[in-house]
Image: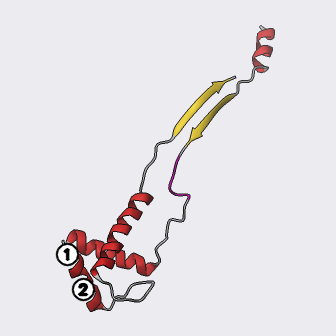
């Protein structure tokens, strides 16, 4: 009947909820400049694909004339180790995945 259709038009439903998400994408993603990225890629390739030691990688980079990015020193094995390990930590941090949550759903 006409009275019930009028009542249906006056009904409003409010739905409220909370969305929680965590991301690592809110930080500056590219902390490496192009030269640091190049060095890291070379070190990773030689370490992971060619199973080279840090000394062998250091000798190879010295032969090509590479120097450290910040201090312009020769890339000693401990520097190569640092480039590799810190780069892996950085990759893990940037590629980390988090779960999202929808919580406190209310219908009024």
- The image quadrant that residue 65 belongs to is bottom left
Q: Report crowding for label 2: few under 14, some 14 to 19, many 20 or more residues within 10 A (C-alpha).
A: some
Above-or-below relation of 97 to 77:
above
Above-or-below relation of 19 to 84:
above
Residue behind mark 1 = 52
Task: Pick the residue in front: 11 or 54.
Answer: 54
Q: Give the magenta range.
A: 22-26
Left or right: 36 in relation to 8: left
All told, the count of numbered labels is 2
User: Can you give x and y, in whole percent of width and height, for residue 44 in the image?
Assistant: 29, 71
Task: Pick the residue in front: 5 or 70.
Answer: 70
Left or right: 7 in relation to 17: right
Disc on the earlier residue, 1 or 2: 1
Q: Is residue 25 within the magenta segment?
A: yes
SS majority, magenta: loop
Name the residue: 50% across, 65% down: 29
Name the residue: 54% across, 45% down: 21
Above-or-below relation of 66 to 94:
below
Question: Looking at this rendering, what residue extends furthest in the front direction?
Answer: 78
User: Can you give x and y, in whole percent of width and height, for residue 103 in the image?
Assistant: 57, 32
Question: Looking at this rendering, what residue extends furthest in the left direction?
Answer: 51
- The Cα–Cα distance between marks 1 and 2, rounded to whole angstroms, is 10 Å
User: Can you give x and y, in whole percent of width and height, for residue 50 in the image?
Assistant: 19, 73
Dots 1 and 2: beta carbons under 8 Å? yes
Q: Report crowding for label 1: few under 14, some 14 to 19, many 20 or more residues within 10 A (C-alpha).
A: some
Q: Is residue 3 within the magenta segment?
A: no
Color theme of the render? secondary structure
Q: Secondary structure at mark 1?
A: loop
Residue behind mark 2 = 60
């Amino acid at each position: 009947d006409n009275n019930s259709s009028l009542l249906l038009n006056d009904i409003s439903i409010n739905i409220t909820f909370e969305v929680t998400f965590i991301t690592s994408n809110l930080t500056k993603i590219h902390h490496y400049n192009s030269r640091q990225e190049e060095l890291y890629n070379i070190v990773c390739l030689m370490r992971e694909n060619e199973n080279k030691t840090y000394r062998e990688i250091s000798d190879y980079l010295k032969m090509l004339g590479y120097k450290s990015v910040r201090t312009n020193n020769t890339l000693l094995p401990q520097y190569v180790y640092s480039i590799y390990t810190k780069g892996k930590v950085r990759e893990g941090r940037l590629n980390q995945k988090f779960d999202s949550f929808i919580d406190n759903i209310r219908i009024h």
